[in-house]
Image: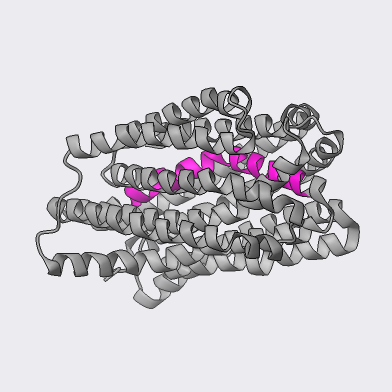
Amino acid sequence: MTWPMLIGILAIMSNQLVDSAFIGQLGALPLAAVGFSIPVYQLIIGIQVGLGIATTTVISMAMGAGKADYAKQLGSLVLSTGFILILLLCLALWFHQETLLFYMGANEELYPLVRDYWIPWLLSAWLGAILYFGYSIFRANGETFLPGMVMVITSVLNMILDPLFIFTFGMGLPGAAWATVVAFIVGGIIIFRGIFARDLIAVPESIRVIFTGLRRLFSFMAPAMMSQFIPPISAMVATSIVAVYGDHAIAAWGLGTRIEFFSIIVVLALTMAMPPMIGRLRGSKEIEKIHQLVLMATGFVLIWQLILAALVATGSSLISNLLTSDETIASLLESYLWLVPVSYAALGVCMLMVSACSAMGMPNLALGISALRLLACYLPLLWIGSELSGLNGLFVGAMAGNMMAGIVSWWMYKRHYLRLKAETGASPDQVACNPD
């Protein structure tokens, strides 16, 4: 189940890097505009992923318990809920864009550029969220191949359209977002045809089913969404700290963030593939296999991310020069790549713990791990590093914060596991938390 997700996410991240490379040719200001947009986009991702986690959990548990019809009705509730929530959020972001940019420390000269960019960009974010909910319904039903392939199709199409919209049609920065809009429309047609063809959703049979389903959905969605909101808020704070060092620093930070997304694709694939497996095992009470799955995934992620960090550091100069033609931005990005990626192994462990706890029916624990990671580890050390040694110190602080977060998240997971064992007098592998 992980391989199709890995291929799909690899395609998405490759597209984002190519997108950054094209935008990088437009100069420092467009890159800075994108850099300020990234933490705002994570707000959209917060609701999107929170609902996606809830979708995977409740539908896979229903399937594991043999309630296939109820699972289909939950699927239709997910789509309608996500459609409305993301639309409202995108509208709110559009009407308050200047306020957000002001508090993140953006220069006023960026405001017109961001305004032109955000029209198609917010549209693409809304379409991408609807597409993501379609992926979640497939994954919850144990199918990852079609979502993975659609990710590849939309990413390749986006890469083909990017230079056409940006340069050939002369749209500049907004052209990158319009290319994404077209790609997501094509992906949406494919994925929703698949949903209807496989009969994965159904109209709720009664008002009672709607309210019961929504209550169950939101019981998982609320803490999952809150845990997803913490990263974008933290990203905005981090961006405001970096903004003190100027537009070149913001541009380098934005590129570094995109490389981070690319570097943790295996972790992201695992966090998308594991929840439906965990949910089904949970529904059938096979708790021992869940714990084995978590241990195996954690060990793999540690080894994989450390190897990847060594490769990124070795090729840091080449990567920096490929992504931007500005020498100052390239130099700052190279420093980032030498320091921060080594901590992605610990970051990956933290992400796995959040995903596993949510899928096991412990969303509050997942929320606690996410909150401590960013508010007690990452941001304080980021600020301390910046105060002590400028921009390079900030990079060191980011590295140290991720490492501490990995240690804390594993400790919290293990502590909760042992506490459950002591309270029940049973083996941890026999313990299950009832989400009801």
Residue 151 sits in which quadrant?
A: top left
Across and down, in percent, residue 222 comes to 40, 68
Task: Please determine whether, in this image, residue 315 is positioned above or below residue 50.
Answer: above
Q: Could you tell whether 220 is left or right of 248 in the image?
A: left
26 or 129: which is nearer to us? Answer: 26
Q: Quadrant of the N terminus?
A: top left
**Does residue 260 belong to the magenta stretch?**
yes
Furthest-left residue in view? 205
Q: Residue at x 43, y 54 (%)?
A: 48
Residue 255 sits in which quadrant?
A: top right
Across and down, in percent, residue 385 comes to 83, 60
280 or 425: which is nearer to us? Answer: 280
Q: Could you tell whether 351 is left or right of 38 in the image?
A: left
Across and down, in percent, residue 252 comes to 76, 43
Across and down, in percent, residue 279 comes to 31, 54
- Residue range corresponding to the magenta coloring: 250-278
Task: Please determine whether, in this image, residue 24 is positioned above or below residue 395.
Answer: above
Query: What scheme was used to colour the molecule?
Result: one colour
